[in-house]
Image: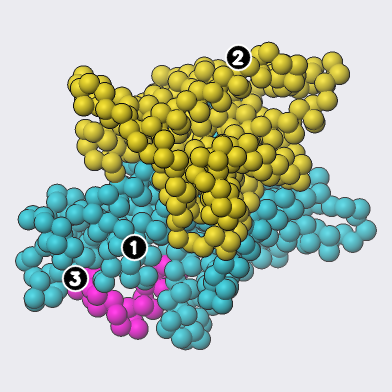
Chain colours: A yellow, B cyan
Amino acid sequence: MDALVNQLPTGLAIGAVLLLAALGLNFTFGQMGVINMAHGEFIMVGAYTAYVLHAWAGLDPTWSLIAALPLAFTLTGTLGWLLELGLIRHFYGRPLDTLLLTFGIGMILQQAARDTFGAPNVDVPAPGWLTDGTTLPGGIRLHHSRLFILALALVCVLAIAHYLHRTHQGRQMRAVIHNRDLAGVSGINTRKVDATTFFIGSGLAGVAGVALTLIGPTGPTLGANYIVDAFLVVVIGGLGRLRGTVLAAFALGILNATAQAWTDASLAKLLVFAAIIAFLQARPQGLFTVKTRALT
Amino acid sequence: MTPTPAPGRRTPLARLRGPATFLALLAAALLLLPHLLEPFRLNLLTQYLCYSIVALGIALAWGRGGMLTLGHGVYFGLGAYAMAIHLTLAATAADPLTRGRLPQFMAWSGRTELPWFWQALTHPAAAVTAALLLPAALATLLGWSVFRQRVRGAYFALLNQALAAAFVILLIGQQHLTGGSNGLTDFPVFAGHSLYTPTAQTTLYTLTVLTLAATYLLLRHLTHSRYGRLLIAIRDGEDRVRYLGYDPTWAKTLAYALSATAAGAAGALFVPVMGIISPTLIGVVPSIMMVLAVAIGGRDSLAGAAAGALIMNTAQTTFSETFTGGWTYLQGALFVVVIALAPHGLAGLAHTARAALRRPRTPAPAQETATAGSTP
């Protein structure tokens, strides 16, 4: 029990990072059934946006962080929108094909980053007020950067929940997810909704990328390192369910942290994988599911 | 519908064409190529043919069974590491300076005795058995437990990928057991024979060609049987098959395990040929490359998949020698072009071309082969 309490802050921090990376997938994979393997590279693009603002435009760390968040959202959102417009919309209903297709796009983006910024990792300095940490009574140390990521993730979740449930466009999006044809005959422009969904989902990858610059170096394979775990979050959480994604991200984060405390990091990954297979024995559709009677 | 006549109505000559082509290719590969190619090129060709064996397995699991496996590097790696561990032990025992001691990397990382699974692989036969059975066992366990719960499609693909990621992290992390990110290398002997002679390399090549041919014949037989038809039915409508009274779980698990075994065999052959195995050869990206080869060759066709692996790896060597970055762009573009324009790969294109030649007047022959169809 002591070990668990000690690992809780680390677990929450890992969970927040996973949540940010997986939130966008909740839109593209969860809601539209598109496996966008280039999502990891969108995260990488977001991270390099922060780098460019600092190193090339010369902004100081605080301002570059504040400016990078909306800029990265717009940039990767546009990339995702273009990807949907140019390629993915021809492949709806063929998830395995989109997976391979977007993996190819991801390879191209990764190599483009390598050619533009070089293969070695670069550093984006965090603002001074985030490099510090607070020590709680009991010797647990909280890094401010991790708290910031946790807060950012929660703000994003609340914004998405508000968008999906309280705005006209969000309701249209949910209608299209539940029954595309019925939404179409009710006068909803489903093509436009698809494009918007992809824009927001990909934009969130950019936000995740900016956040990741606070806790580690930025490199061409930054997104690839997170994407496998991020997809697992959506698999565990269940398709298209925001609360499932949130719960699964933190569960996976805490599980990772606890397993790492028990054994070493390399064995922990395998243990977590085994735990996921075991979990799927009980709930093969993930934590929460949208009920359907469709014949597949 | 395609203009291909039913198999029963083909002329005797047409029925002989397939086996004749196969035998001609096999004879050319075994009798001609070892004399025509210089040893370096023959070695490269043997490596590519190992990937062709993997491709055959993926064509069965993905093309026929609809199971997109993004983690075949794991099974390839299990076979490869079983063989590599044995070869490292053999190398240590063969050198009078190191005989009776631990392999060097183990001693450096502070181990004092051989781990149990290394001891178990001392005998060559044990290594070969492990290279075939370990992948089969892991695939059966994973396949059965997820297929039983009807976890499939994208979920299955992502789980496979997670397994590949975890496996590589484990290999790198447990450096004192596996050689870490350097992997295992330097394999001079197998079962008392030197591996560095030209004869040994030719023997390895022959062995690889024969394994490839045997795997092809076995999988071809399977895919043309009732079981093969069941697999396709499961791919195209798993729940419908269930309603007809079949249990898709065992059929899928069998195909997945067979395809893992093929990858394991390929891995075991690959190690003495390549002379090294390391985590970079079997991670998430190499696993996807194995799938790309099958996509290029044609997921519906066993021969196409094997050819796809050969072509892609040849292209990789040729292009990456001249411009490294350019090859990555080209590879990424290949993914897009093949999936978008030729979902049935080169084999599908060849089929379309043949059909067009046979009936030049037919307007726009259908792309689908007898077994083709969109993979869900």
* Segment tinted magenta in the rendering: B188-210
List x then y, in percent, for residue B195.
28, 76
Q: Which residue is mark 1?
A: B277
Q: Position of residue B106 (x, y in %)?
A: 15, 59
Q: Amino acid at mark 3?
A: Ala
Q: Secondary structure at mark 3?
A: helix
Q: Is residue B197 left or right of residue B321?
A: left
The chain to which mark 3 is attached is B
The residue wearing badge 2 is: A291
- The mark that comes first in sequence, 3 or 1, is 3
The verdict on residue B193 being magenta is: yes
Is disc 1 on the same chain as disc 2? Answer: no
Q: Can you tell which quarter of the image residue B209 is in?
A: bottom left
Apparent side of residue A97 relative to residue B155 in the rendered image (left or right): right
Query: Hey, what amino acid is under mark 1?
Result: Ile
Tags 3 and 1 in contact by the CB under 8 Å rule? no
Percent coordinates x, y for residue A264 in the rendering: 24, 40
Which residue is depicted at the point 36% across and 43% down?
A: B166
Q: Chain of mark 1?
A: B
Quote the CA–CA distance across marks 2 and 3: 59 Å
Q: Which of the two marks, 2 or 3, is nearer to us in this view?
A: 2
Which residue occupies 63% across, 51% down?
A: A105
Q: CA distance from mark 3 to mark 1?
A: 15 Å
Which mark is on residue B91? 3
Q: Quadrant of the N terminus of chain B?
A: top right
* Alpha carbons under labels 2 and 1: distance apart: 46 Å
